Amino acid sequence: MRESPGNRGAMTLRVFNMSEEKKPIEEKTEEKPVEEPKVEAPAVEVKTEEAPAEAPVEAKEEKPAEEPRIEGAVNKGDFILMEMTGKAEETGEVFDATNEETAKEKGIHREGNVYGPRLVVVGEGWVLRGLDARLHGVKPNELTAIEIPPAEAFGERDPTQVQLIPFRILRSKGVNPVPGAELEIDGRQAVIRSVGAGRVQVDYNHALAGRKIIYDVKVTEIITEEKAKVKALIGRRFVGVDAEKFGQKMGKKKMTFTVPDEIFFGENIQIAKRGLAMDVLKFFPELEDVEFLEIVKRS
């Protein structure tokens, strides 16, 4: 009979007794009281009330602290109307102007553009990121100069975006490359830097990349009344259309617009309607629906 490893000590004691007294004796081994095996519950079943002090703590992304509200000034989320003129600090070149006379004077006037104070909801990214971030605290009706570093304006210059293209390729696309010309190549805006030796140096960087920008701004109004906010949103989506001609009725859950018949067949009318609807639902979270009524009257 094989000895089990657990009984080897007891068997050795029995052989020793038989050889000394020449007779079998009853096994009287001093057996230690058998201890009940300790059965430990699986760790997953152990439920304790211990505080998870040693448990790994997941890192939580901290939200940026809200800027304190400043009375009598522009704050995040405000609807504002703002006159603005943007220029490159290095050259003084003006590239953006909401005032029509300034645009004409600086040679950037565009026929068909609508000039006047621009609607901005602060913090929504409707203007350059660096400008948007610096509007907090601006006082109404005061001309304020705001400096914006390149990274928060049109980005740093990227040398990899300057490429050489064979002259013949541009000619085949009907392009006559002239240094300084701005054009679109394969859907990308570019500037011709130089022409020579059968190749053209093309720069896909923004023309103002790498430059510090200065905006002279003047907040002409902070809009607080709901109906006026909706009117401003209409003007943003239906550019050049008198917002007063739109009927508007705000209920508890629905906003209804009556569309003037003069724009029933306007260009991109459906895109403008959808854009206005999304704006209204975003800035008036208590609303659930936006409805457009197009009423045709007997002539």
Image (cartoon, rainbow, N blue to C red):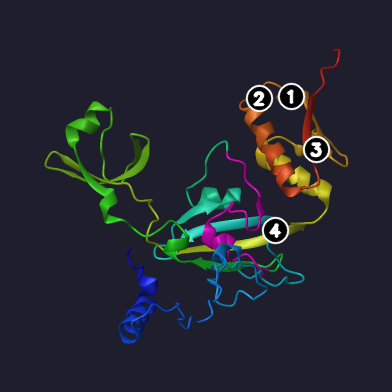
Q: Quadrant of residue 23?
A: bottom left
Label 3 and label 1: CA atoms lie apart by 13 Å
User: Which disc is residue 262 wearing?
Assistant: 1
Neighbourhood count class around disc 3 (C-alpha, 10 Å): few under 14, some 14–19, many 20 upward: few
Q: Nearer the viewer, mark 1 or mark 4?
A: 4
Residue 118 on the magenta segment: yes
Neighbourhood count class around disc 4 (C-alpha, 10 Å): few under 14, some 14–19, many 20 upward: few
Residue at image position (36%, 82%) is 13
Q: Secondary structure at mark 4?
A: loop
Q: Quadrant of residue 250?
A: top right
Residue 143 on the magenta segment: no
**In the picture provided, is 76 more to the left or to the right than 182?**
right
The kind of residue on which mark 1 rests is Glu
**In the picture provided, is 235 more to the left or to the right than 175?**
right
User: Which disc is residue 244 wearing?
Assistant: 3
Label 1 and label 4: CA atoms lie apart by 33 Å
Read off the magenta span: 113-138
Q: Nearer the viewer, residue 221 or 37?
A: 37
Residue placed furthest toward the bottom = 20
Residue 268 at x, y = what percent?
Answer: 61, 27
Mark sitting earlier along the chain (2/4): 4
Q: Nearer the viewer, residue 60 or 154?
A: 60
The kind of residue on which mark 3 rests is Glu
Q: Quadrant of residue 7?
A: bottom left
**In the picture provided, is 221 more to the left or to the right than 134?**
right
**In the picture provided, is 292 more to the left or to the right than 236?**
right
The kind of residue on which mark 4 rests is Gly
**What residue does disc 2 label?**
266
Mark sitting earlier along the chain (3/4): 4
